[in-house]
Amino acid sequence: MSYNIKELPNGIRIVHQEVTHTRLIHCGFILDIGSRDETKEQEGIAHFWEHMAFKGTKKRKAFHILNRLDSVGGELNAYTTKEKICFYSTILKEHFNKAAELLCDITFNSVFPEKQIERERHVILEEMAMYRDSPEDAIQDDFDAQIFENHALGRNILGREETVSSFAQQDFFDFLSSRLDTSKIIFSVVGNISFSKVLKQVEKYLLEIPIKKRLYIRSSFSSYKPTVKTIEKDISQSLCAIGKPSLDLYHKDRFKLHLLNNILGGPSMNSRLNLALREKHGYVYSVESTYQSYTDTGFLGIFYGTEPKNANKAKKLVLKEMEKLRTQKLGTMQLHMAKEQAIGQMAMAEENHAALMLVLGKTLLDKGKIDDLDTIFGIIQQTTAEQLQDLANEQLAAEEFSYLTYLPK
């Protein structure tokens, strides 16, 4: 796949990939600002800003923002992660200019109307309550706090009730002025439009944005100690989390760890954990292992739910499968099948053009270049059984993991 990249004088970069066999265009801003960039008093303000971007700009009220693309069948959305905020849209190609102009408006010209802040505050407090009522979501937030204790990566993206209840209009302006950096912003476009047309329609909006530089520097995560915690909840299942910090976004073995994690408990039904816990013993409905990389660290975790009487048996099976990957080298056919599965999943993911648009922006933002799929496939194909076993010994030692269990009251 060929990509086009252009950097504007203010530092904002445009990345583009043309896809001709569609009527749609997916486009969006990816900003290098996330919940980890908040102070303790600001917890939740990045996510709150994501909500407020739709509530009024210098020239539009909330209704006009929401109606602008809905009226032509388009979609407008946003999300916040630990390290990124994204505002994005999907639109018919003939309405691309509308989407691009609107995205520029809500990203850079929000005015945070005070009445809307009060309304949206209640919406976010309800969102927080909804997540607390969902133990599968709550355990991931609690486990983040346990793994990344006393660090911004461990804080809830939604914030705390006391911080969300305290934000006023000036707090949003202060946060943006200290965190916004135009050299850390990508406008990404994937769809049925040429690069020259993208530039013609987008540059007139982006060139108006003045250069902004942030002096703020993220604090890296370095201190980790394995811990074991049990929390009683009003639930019927025991929910279990097992995890530890792992490889960062720039580590040379990141794609090998993706392959190893896929074998252990990836999304396919033939993962080691699914076969052992569900298919063979019937202890769980679902079990997954996940690997998430950040700019300075990573997270490797396993999540599952089971009847309380089976909790210890399930845990022993999880640890057994981890240990097998450390002590038993994959056979030639096992390794070949694992590689083919991982490559197939990545290739299918690229067919999702909306997701690809976001991935292009995030990759360019973090690495300054695009990871070519053929290069990634090459790394996976060249991975040996010995390398995977060495990596398993580094990453899957049971004594290095933390454990969190939700027990029914």
Image (tube, helix red, strand yellow):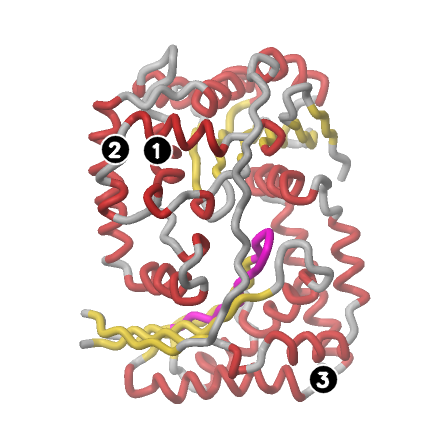
Q: Circle 3 — which element?
A: loop
Q: Circle 2 — which element?
A: helix
Q: What residue sits 41% from the left and 76% below the top? A: 227
Residue 38 locus on image (x, y percent) = 41, 43
Question: Which label was assigned to residue 150?
Answer: none
On the image, numbered disc 2 is attached to which residue? Answer: 120
Asked whether, in this view, residue 199 is left or right of residue 68, the answer is: right
Quadrant (top left/top right/bottom left/bottom right) for the C terminus: bottom left
Asked whether, in this view, residue 68 is left or right of residue 187, the answer is: left
Q: Is residue 189 visible?
A: no
Tag 1 near tag 3, CB within 8 Å = no
Give the amino acid at mark 1: His
The answer to which of 318 and 12 lies nearer the viewer is: 12
Q: Earlier in the sequence, mark 1 or mark 3?
A: 1
Boundaries of the magenta span? 293-304
Q: Earlier in the sequence, mark 2 or mark 3?
A: 2
Q: Circle 1 — which element?
A: helix
Residue 98 locus on image (x, y percent) = 50, 16
Give the amino acid at mark 2: Glu
Q: Quadrant of residue 370?
A: top right
Question: Which label was assigned to residue 51?
Answer: 1
State whether residue 349 is above or below residue 338: above
Q: What residue sits 38% from the left and 26% below the top? A: 173
